[in-house]
Amino acid sequence: MERTIRVLVAKPGLDGHDRGAKVIARALRDAGMEVVYTGLRQTPEQIVQAAVQEDVDVIAMSILSGAHNHLFPRVTELLAEKKVDDVLVIGGGVIPEGDYEFLKSKGIAAIFGPGTPTGTTVEFIRTHLKR
Amino acid sequence: MSGNEKLKVELERWNAGVDKSLAKHPERRKDFVTGSKAPVERLYTPADLAGREYLDDIGLPGEYPFTRGVQTTMYRGRFWTMRQYAGFATAEESNKRYKFLLEQGQTGLSVAFDLPTQIGYDSDHPLSAGEVGKVGVAIDSLADMELLFDGIPLDKVSTSMTINAPAAVLLAMYIAVAEKQGVTADKLNGTIQNDILKEYVARGTYIFPPEPSMRLITDIFAYCSKEVPAWNTISISGYHIREAGSTAVQEVAFTLADGIAYVEAAIKAGLDVDEFAPRLSFFFNAHNDLFEEVAKFRAARRLWAKVMKERFGAKSPKSWMLRFHTQTGGSTLTAQQPDNNVVRVAIQALAAVLGGTQSLHTNSRDEALALPTEESVRIALRTQQIIANESGAAETVDPLAGSYYVESLTNRIEDEAWNYIRKIDSLGGAVKAIEHGFVQQEIQDAAYAYQMDVESGERVVVGLNKFQVKESAPEGLLRVDPSVGASQTAKLKALRAKRDSSKVESALAALKAASKSDANLMPPIVEAVKAYATLGEICDVLRATFGEYQQKVTI
């Protein structure tokens, strides 16, 4: 039997907009994944710690405050420091397309902007798992 | 036969004809619904309003129950206040944007603060990293506030500040800046949002737990009723509840339930209802369903008037009036074909005006992508000016009154909102309902249902799930200079070196003592601000006494 995919949905930084994070958490759950949602105001350290503790396959971060270029790469850096290389990291929110390349170069596998159907994210996760 | 009986007969005859025509020409869909998924009938007639008395239900403008508006002549006297929410980067940068907006004919200011400011952290706090100046202006101390309003006479403008958990501190800074300009507090006009309950359910910039937060709010009510009498001490907000995904009915119900909780807290703190209630104001969203939104504003006014008069026994008509600000719906904007958003905003703004708003912010077309550019902000402001000066919507009071459809919707929204309010009452009031997660769950369910409707194509969003085009990445978006964090940190360091630190310490000690007593917290906060204590230092004192709120996580 296929293993259940485990996802950490995380809200890094001080941003309080969690509509998207909660919708995506529920959509992933409805797609048969196990979802842990961190709640608001998580530091990159807390997110990585939760990811390791919960042994997740995916970290899905949502941010709408504009702090993505600072906070997303911190998460991948911390994962690298902990020698975790088999967790898929993705992001979403209000993020200008001009920042996508930079974020990808920092190990964020994909960015899902406003209007992305949840099915697109589900499909991406299924086809890009690292373990 | 009476008119109503005759109508009934005629409707039966007409319906039989409709059935025949449907066999040949079916309607576009089986069920028609509003933007909030409430059922919409094919036709509305006087039969839908049977049993309703015009004078009891709708009445006259400026009179109970205020269905038609809170002013007697509405926009024939003067237009609503055109107030664009703005602020980013440093105080200097935002000050420039405010002066630009005032030059463009804007009539009030609306300050956006960055997240560290909204959560009571200084710019050099570790949690502020990456967030300084991003979604609003960074304010660390009175020194920043002085720069923010430099050259703007505070007795001439009205200023709205979107600040909640640390609202007392920012209001104290505003009072202190005015004093330096030679303007006394009784001349100040404006609003602080100061609505913590919706932060717990929808917006997220809370600091303290509910009980001390409610105390801070009632302290502000009491202080302002004496010292800053023209100030709107709270803006009870449905805007963010709607943005989080609620329906129109939930927006009205949860906002007014929060309002009831504030009134109860203030009465419990010993305040007289007619002393503080006239300074309560509201803040609503405007989404795309024109008629449902207009009905929502009208229903909210009528409901609040009844709550204040009947439930709280307020005597002054000013206490019964629901005055509100409106912002168009950020979450309705698409990142796809962003120029289409100008049209959405125009429809939403028209709804707000037809619904009798007191002030209005129109969103800019590029807000699904980034903070708006100056050009986009100008189009958004021009949209309001076109509605005001060219559309004719402002020439008579409450022009949609008497529409069978709009009056029916108004009645339905009011009835359904009452049902929610009774449910919340049965849970022990808004604070308890939030602690249980009831309000959050209701909003999330509606948000998820909306998303599924968009994905199934049941709900059409132009450019997003229908009428798409291939697009290249948008250009010319506004970017906040990432060096803001470093420059704010340097400013803070200089401030801490320059200020009289013994004065700061004694002011903070006085605040600490007050926080542990029943004393009103506003006077010691004003003193601390004047001594150039930072926002973070002041909030830390309160954190030490009050503790911090732990979010109830639900998905």
Image (tube, coloured by chain):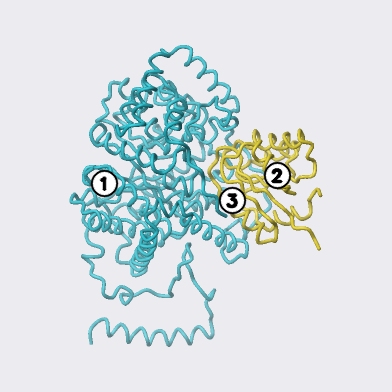
Q: Identify the subunit bearing mark 1.
A: B
User: Would you say the residues marked 1 and 2 are in contact, meaning their CB atoms lie under 8 Å apart?
Assistant: no
Residue B520: x and y, percent?
30, 32
SS class of the residue under badge 3?
Answer: helix
Which label lies toward us, 1 or 3?
1
Q: Amino acid at mark 3?
A: Gly
Q: Colour of chain A?
A: yellow
**Numbered tag placed on residue B267 in the rendering:** 1
Which quadrant of the structure image shows residue A120? bottom right
Q: Identify the subunit bearing mark 3.
A: A
Ranked by sequence position, the earlier of labels 2 and 3 is: 3
Residue visible at 46% across and 44% down in the picture: B380
The residue lying toward the viewer, choosing from A44 and B245, is A44
Residue B199: x and y, percent?
46, 45
Q: Against B117, is B400 above or below? A: below
Q: Amino acid at mark 2?
A: Gln
SS class of the residue under badge 2?
Answer: helix
User: Would you say the residues marked 2 and 3 are in contact, meaning their CB atoms lie under 8 Å apart?
Assistant: no
Q: Which residue is mark 3?
A: A20
